[in-house]
Image: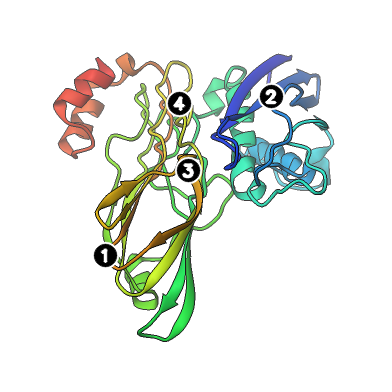
């Protein structure tokens, strides 16, 4: 990494209580053998559960660096040249009794995204556009009258990875922090009173670029028996994963619940709790696509033609996105 100061930003949609984005400002300074990460100026502590404890904040930075240099082993020496200015007074340095349940699965990925955005300006050949960056936490809980017992079905879902120098992003990859993806839908349907009406690739959700982002997924869950409550903690519902070096942002996360024929969308876009559903009601989710890398006008015509042939874009969409 060349010596210099590199800056990047990212944001959490909201804390789930106050409908305002939480901004992460990341300044990375490279001097000699040392890297210093400074988040001064990030948003203040929040009321909802999206505050981050300092252990998670530091771990997210270490994770981001590991993504950039995967061949470097993890040991005590790995951390010696990495210095973190502890961001006291921000939501990235939570103190008791601030709620923090969303930090490990969601805020950590926004922190890593801010690091990626900063370092892309220094070493673009080693970096990539932003990935989906959400674990897609969704819980459905209730009482199954057929099995005569309570249940909670909890899902982590995949999304698109960002494009990178030389290649398109992975589609339906697991989250940046390494959480596993959901089990096969057939297994979930055996254990819980649900039917997956759809589980498909979210075509066109990857950001356009010389190397496009990978695609997220669509899924729809119908309740078959009893009543249930639905809660979710997701992100990238307000803005999609960032493109890099002229690439377009990936598609945003969307959630929609159909209750007795009426459509409901969470006021905080990607976060809500205790949504009541009954038999026949459906929960629909679209996960984010990855950001695009590089100028879309530089994408090879044969790559665009291949995407159209595979149904990823219509011809009209391809013309619009890639000129």
**Residue at image location 43% in from the left, 29% down from the top:** 291
Badge 2 element: strand
Q: Report the residue marked by disc 4.
A: 165
Residue 305, can we see it? yes
Front one among 4 and 109: 109
Instruction: From the viewer's side, name the closer residue of 70 and 147.
Output: 147
- The secondary structure type at the circle numbered 1 is loop
Q: Distance from label 3 to label 1 (Cα)?
A: 22 Å
The image shows residue 32, relative to residue 258, as above or below, that is: above
- For the residues labelled 2 and 4, say whether their Cβ atoms are less than 8 Å apart: no
Q: Quadrant of the N terminus?
A: top right
Q: Nearer the viewer, mark 2 or mark 4?
A: 2
> Which residue carries the number 2 mark?
26
Q: Earlier in the sequence, mark 3 or mark 1?
A: 3
Label 3 belongs to which residue?
A: 270
Q: Is residue 182 above or below residue 263?
A: below
Residue that appears at 44% across and 47% down: 173
Q: Going 20% across and 19% down the picture, which residue do you hit?
A: 319
Left-right relation of 63 to 132: right
- Going by the image, does 94 lie left or right of 288? right
- Provide residue 44's location: percent of width, then percent of height: 73, 30
Badge 2 local density, few (<14 within 10 Å), some, or many (20+)?
Answer: many
Near mark 3 (Cα within 10 A), the count class, few <14, some 14-19 or many ≥20, is: many
Mark 1 to mark 2: distance in Å? 46 Å
Marks 4 and 1, how far apart at CA: 45 Å
Residue 68 in view: no
Residue at point 18%, 39% (across, down)? 311
The mark that comes first in sequence, 1 or 2, is 2
Q: Are marks 1 and 2 in contact (CB under 8 Å)?
A: no
Residue 154 appears at what percent x and percent y? Answer: 49, 63
């Amino acid at each position: 990494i060349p010596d210099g100061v590199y800056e990047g930003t990212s944001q959490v949609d909201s804390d789930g209580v106050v409908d305002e984005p939480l901004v992460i400002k990341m300044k990375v300074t490279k001097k000699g053998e040392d890297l210093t990460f400074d988040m001064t100026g990030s948003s203040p502590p929040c009321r909802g559960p999206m505050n981050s404890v300092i252990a998670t904040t530091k771990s997210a930075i270490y994770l981001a660096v590991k993504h950039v240099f995967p061949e470097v082993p993890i040991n005590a020496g790995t951390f010696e040249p990495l210095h973190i200015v502890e961001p006291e007074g921000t939501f990235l340095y939570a103190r008791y009794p601030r709620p923090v349940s969303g930090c490990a699965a969601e805020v950590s990925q926004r922190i890593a995204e801010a690091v990626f955005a900063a370092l892309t300006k220094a070493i673009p050949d080693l970096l990539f556009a932003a990935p989906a960056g959400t674990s897609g936490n969704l819980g459905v809980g209730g009482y199954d009258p057929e099995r005569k017992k309570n249940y909670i079905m909890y899902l982590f879902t995949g999304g698109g990875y960002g494009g990178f120098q030389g290649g398109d992003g992975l589609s339906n990859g697991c989250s940046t922090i390494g959480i596993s993806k959901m089990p096969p839908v057939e297994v979930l349907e055996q254990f819980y009173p649900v039917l997956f009406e759809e589980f498909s690739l979210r075509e066109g959700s990857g950001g356009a670029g010389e190397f496009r982002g990978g695609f997220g997924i669509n899924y729809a869950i119908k309740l078959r028996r009893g009543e249930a409550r639905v809660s979710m903690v997701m992100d990238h519902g307000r803005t999609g994963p960032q493109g890099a070096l002229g690439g377009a942002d990936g598609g945003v996360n969307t959630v929609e619940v159909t209750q007795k024929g009426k459509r409901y969308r969470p006021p905080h876009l990607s976060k809500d709790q205790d949504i009541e559903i009954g038999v026949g009601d459906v929960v629909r989710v679209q996960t984010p696509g990855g950001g695009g890398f590089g100028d879309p006008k530089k994408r090879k015509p044969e790559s665009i033609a291949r995407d159209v042939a595979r149904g990823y874009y219509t011809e009209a969409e391809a013309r619009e996105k890639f000129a």
